[in-house]
Image (tube, grey):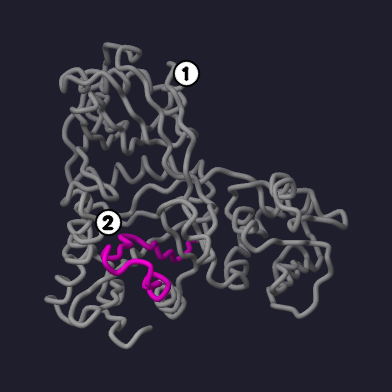
Amino acid sequence: MEEDYQFYKPKKMEDYGLLYNVMDAAFNDEDVASIVRRFVEKHPGMTQGDYFMVKHGEKAVAGLVLIPQRWSIDGVELKVAEMGCVGTDPAYRRKRLQYILNEKFDEYARENGYDLCVLAGIPYFYRQFGYQYAVELDYLSTVDVEKLPRDSKLTTRSFEPQDIQAAQRLLDETQRKYMVHSVRTDEIWRMQEETRTYGADPFKGNVILEGNQMIAYIRWWAEPKEKTLVIKELALKDRAQSREIAGIIRAEAEKQGLNKILSKLSYEDAFSKYLIELGADKDKIYAWQVKILNPRGFLEKLGPVLERRLKDSEFKGLSKELRMNFWKYAISLKFEDGKLVSVEEVTEAKRVLGMNPYASIQLFLGYRSREELEYMYPDFYIRGGNQRLIDVLFPRSPGYIHYCY
């Protein structure tokens, strides 16, 4: 770093003003400073260590934020560091300041026991920092309001803090279909309800009732200019109730003078499938970009998942060593009687399991199958009759992250 530049983290409340200023300069057409301010003032788990800046003299000229989360892979929780609000003052771009911040971000994440670094940022740029697309993101399906049923036997009211526990049970049920999903705490629920913000966007929340029982909740927002009601999150008790819920949504849209429904729910979601059956148009989805900080430690944490998958397959009771050649390093997974007894870095691995390290992120998180990756990457291949075993250990399965801030 040149002499006039220094890496900096907030030491007192006044220092956050420097970060707000650089966000205003970097995103002059978006109010990103308000998002950062919400983290500073409202997020229950963020500390001064989660805010990163580069200063030029007394002025902050680049910054980013670490947003702590928990993600689950088939029941194993991982500590996740999302990189968000990444910006550089236009007058200071192309000076590699974000390279400095990325190095500091990774260093801090390792020191604080994070398993994954993730981001939902712009295309391609972050590949240079080791990120790979690996979990589904930004589903969009659109349908005309007139295609939804007009009537409903259900009723609705505003979501209240006392509804959180029942809503969490509905969310838990929804998330069971996703191999990779987020873990939302009660504190995060309360922060979202207090700020009425979901991710970076505002929302309104409603409970949907059958009699006095909550059978669904919805988080939505109206976009009058686009004449669109946006569904941001919806969890329901039973897919059979989709039609009645759609009637509630149509009534709200017509009340707001809107003629389109835009759903951001996963295409695997029960209500999304109902909308698609009604003729909703689907857009191509984007993806979370993911980096595994410590591949050996990551695979070790997945031990209970791998053992459960073996137990439920023809490989029950497996005793075998798998040496994965990641080309720059190699890792041995040793199983005895179906138990993962060791995960070690080794100095030698034959060219049996050729595990392109970036493609392997997609395999481990269920984003791509072994067959797909072998087709896409010449330096990813499975030999020695291990194809079916790798399919069992690392199956293709969709993921979905419900926002945790």
Residue at (21%, 61%) from the top-left corner? 25
User: Residue 103: where, in percent of width, then height?
Assistant: 44, 76
Q: Is residue 116 depicted above or below 176 in this figure? A: below
Residue type, label 1:
Glu
Residue at (48%, 64%) from the top-left corner? 78
Residue at (27%, 63%) from the top-left corner? 90
Placement of the N terminus among the 4 image quadrants: bottom left
Extreme bottom residue here? 3
Q: 96 or 176: nearer the eye?
A: 96
Query: Distance from label 1 to label 2 (Cα)?
Result: 33 Å
Q: Residues within 10 Å of mark 1 (few under 14, many from 20)?
A: few
Query: Which of the marked residues, 1 or 2, is nearer the chain's N terminus?
Result: 2
User: Where are the magenta residues, as a range?
Assistant: 77-101
Task: Report if residue 336 is visible in the image.
Answer: no
Q: 274 or 57: nearer the eye?
A: 57
Residue type, label 2:
Ile
Q: Is residue 48 depicted above or below 316 in this figure? A: below
Q: 11 or 44: nearer the eye?
A: 11
Q: Is residue 94 magenta?
A: yes
In the rendered structure, the answer to whether residue 281 lies left or right of residue 263 reads right
Mark 1 touching mark 2, by CB under 8 A?
no
In the rendered structure, the answer to whether residue 241 lies left or right of residue 191 reads right
In the rendered structure, the answer to whether residue 261 lies left or right of residue 374 reads left
From the viewer's perspective, is the residue at label 1 or at label 2 nearer?
1
User: Residue 64: where, in percent of width, then height?
Assistant: 31, 67
Mark 2, residue position: 188
Q: Is residue 251 magenta?
A: no
Placement of the C terminus among the 4 image quadrants: bottom left
Mark 1, residue position: 277
